[in-house]
Amino acid sequence: MTSRNTDRNPNVQVVNEDSENNVLAEKIRGSLETELSQNKPEDDAFHTINVMQNILDSEDLLKYMEQTDCCTCERCQADVRALSLTKLPSKYVVIRKNDTSPTISFYREKYRMDIISTIMRAAEEVKAHPHHGQERN
């Protein structure tokens, strides 16, 4: 390693950039950066979810639509889903990605009856006023 003291400040050393220590330090830094980037799992990141939408997406809308004798075409399914989401309160939470499933399970049990009754009312409303076959702008 080549180094020299500067004339201005005796505490400052100038190190030759090609020195063995600098090359070794760069290798260590590069290795640490690689290791840190590999050890940061995406599942540890935070995200925001609408719990009600997440639960509704996992519900079997067709089952409830069939129970009310509602049409089960693609348009009516979309209408029941949209109407249900409109009538349900939004419930946004910020959680780690790997905690999504337990959080959804907790809220599913808490709001289960509200969600099912909202889906059933939406299916009844869509049954009474279906939009299939109609063009909407």
Image (cartoon, rainbow, N blue to C red):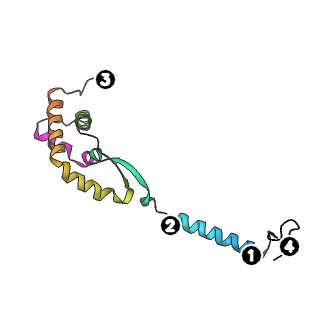
In the drawing, what numbered circle is on residue 21? Answer: 1
State which quarter of the image contains the C terminus. top left
Q: Secondary structure at mark 1?
A: helix
Span shown in magenta: 55-73
Q: Secondary structure at mark 2?
A: helix
Separation of residues labelled 2 and 1 (CA atoms) = 27 Å
Is residue 114 placed above or below 28 in the rendered structure?
above
Specify the quadrant of the image occupied by residue 2. bottom right
Separation of residues labelled 2 and 3 (CA atoms) = 50 Å
Residue 95 shown left or right of residue 123 in the figure = right
Which residue is denoted by mark 2 in the rendering? 39
In primary-sequence order, the first of circles 2 and 1 is 1
Q: Residue at x 85, y 72 (%)?
A: 5
Which residue is denoted by mark 4 in the rendering? 4
- The amino acid at mark 4 is Arg
Q: Residue at x 19, y 51 (%)?
A: 110
Which of the two marks, 4 or 2, is nearer to us in this view?
4
Q: Secondary structure at mark 4?
A: strand
Q: Residue at x 55, y 66 (%)?
A: 36
Point out residue 77 in the picture as x, y percentages from the top left corner.
Answer: 23, 37
Point out residue 114 in the picture as x, y percentages from the top left corner.
Answer: 17, 43
Which residue is denoted by mark 3 in the rendering? 136
- The amino acid at mark 2 is Asn
Point out residue 52 in the picture as x, y percentages from the top left corner.
Answer: 27, 45
Separation of residues labelled 1 and 3 (CA atoms) = 71 Å
